[in-house]
Amino acid sequence: MDVSFVKTPEIQQLLDRAAGVNESGGSPRLKAIMRDLTESVMELIVRHDISESEFWLAMKYLSDSAGEIGLIVPGIGLEHFLDLYMDAKDAEAGLTGGTPRTIEGPLYVAGAPLVEGNVNLSVDEDEGTTVLHMTGHVTGPDGEAVQQAIVHVWHANSKGWYSHFDPTGEQTPFNNRRRIKLGKDGRYAFHSKQPSGYSVPPGGSTDQLMQALGRHGNRPAHVHFFIEAPGYRTLTTQINFGDDPFAEDDFAFGTREGLLPVPSRQGDSAYIQFNFQMQRA
Ligand code: MBD
Ligand code: FE
């Protein structure tokens, strides 16, 4: 059947009533969005002639996967889409330049210890032998050192697990998570046990979906950042290791040109020098 079937008066009236369009209470914006969302699902059902059993299988999947929604959203490209959409809106407004933004992902935790100087992020035991040393500066659009910057940094341990989300229970809160307060020169430096790439939980909802799509659920090793400073726009970004086997094949689409430094390696040390440029608020 043609999707224009969804436009019959009976279905249009159903959509209006279901979204409370003619009710005085509620939020007009939510009504408009809900109406369009439901209509889009109806069109999808018609376009793909989705059977009842397929429909209820999808509903069961949605219900079972609620705890992994934060992984599914990047996995299906929606979180990266938000970056592209924000970039396009910025370009329209004439706002360009600076370090590219990229996805936050689902594993940030607020309230990490606020520290200064050349800090160690890995406070827990970690059998990994490679130490990552990251250094660089934070500047504004004219190359000026950004004042009063705070660099939020978080990454996985050498097994690919994040503190607060580690099923082995081996990490203490805020391991590999800090807020670094920068001095007047806008320089930062930290060291930590080198993170491993991340894999979605085996057998979980995201893994099931990736397998059904003939894909995998791996990310290259990476380090996340929020960079904030008065008078500047907060930057959400990450660096991915350019020498990781998944550098060009990130299931979450978080790798971007300009954000793939190749560490220089000497023995048990990996060095990444990376400078951030912020936009003015
Ligand atoms: C991660 O570590 C991550 O950064 C993203 C975006 C998705 C899953 C795991
Ligand atoms: Fe991550």
Image (cartoon, helix red, strand yellow):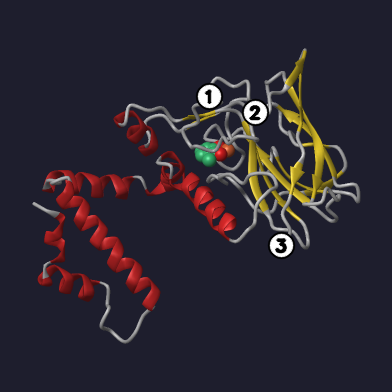
Left-right relation of 94 to 25: right
Left-right relation of 257 to 189: left
Residue most extreme to the bottom:
24
Residue placed under numbered mark 1 in the picture: 246
Which residue is drawn at the image coordinates 48% and 37% (left, top)?
252
Q: Quadrant of residue 197?
A: top right
Place of residue 119 in the rendered image (x, y in percent of width and height, measured from the top left): 82, 38
Label 3 or label 2, whichever comes before in sequence order: 2
256 vs 4: above or below = above
Place of residue 275 in the rendered image (x, y in percent of width and height, measured from the top left): 77, 39
Q: Are marks 3 and 1 in contact (CB under 8 Å)?
A: no
Place of residue 232 in the rendered image (x, y in percent of width and height, measured from the top left): 74, 59
Q: State the separation of the CA atoms marked 2 and 1.
A: 14 Å
Place of residue 139 in the rendered image (x, y in percent of width and height, measured from the top left): 81, 48
Q: Secondary structure at mark 3?
A: loop
Within 8 Å: ligand 2 and the Cβ of disc 2?
Answer: no
Residue most extreme to the right:
184
Q: Which mark is residue 281?
A: 3
Q: Nearer the viewer, residue 195 or 37?
A: 37
Q: Nearer the viewer, mark 3 or mark 1?
A: 3
Q: Secondary structure at mark 1?
A: loop
Q: State the separation of the CA atoms marked 3 and 1.
A: 34 Å
Label 3 or label 1, whichever comes before in sequence order: 1
Residue type (three-letter) at the residue carrying disc 3 = Ala
Q: Secondary structure at mark 2?
A: loop
Residue type (three-letter) at the residue carrying disc 2 = Pro
Residue placed under numbered mark 2 in the picture: 195
Which residue is drawn at the image coordinates 16% and 74% (left, top)?
13
Q: Nearer the viewer, residue 280 or 14?
A: 280
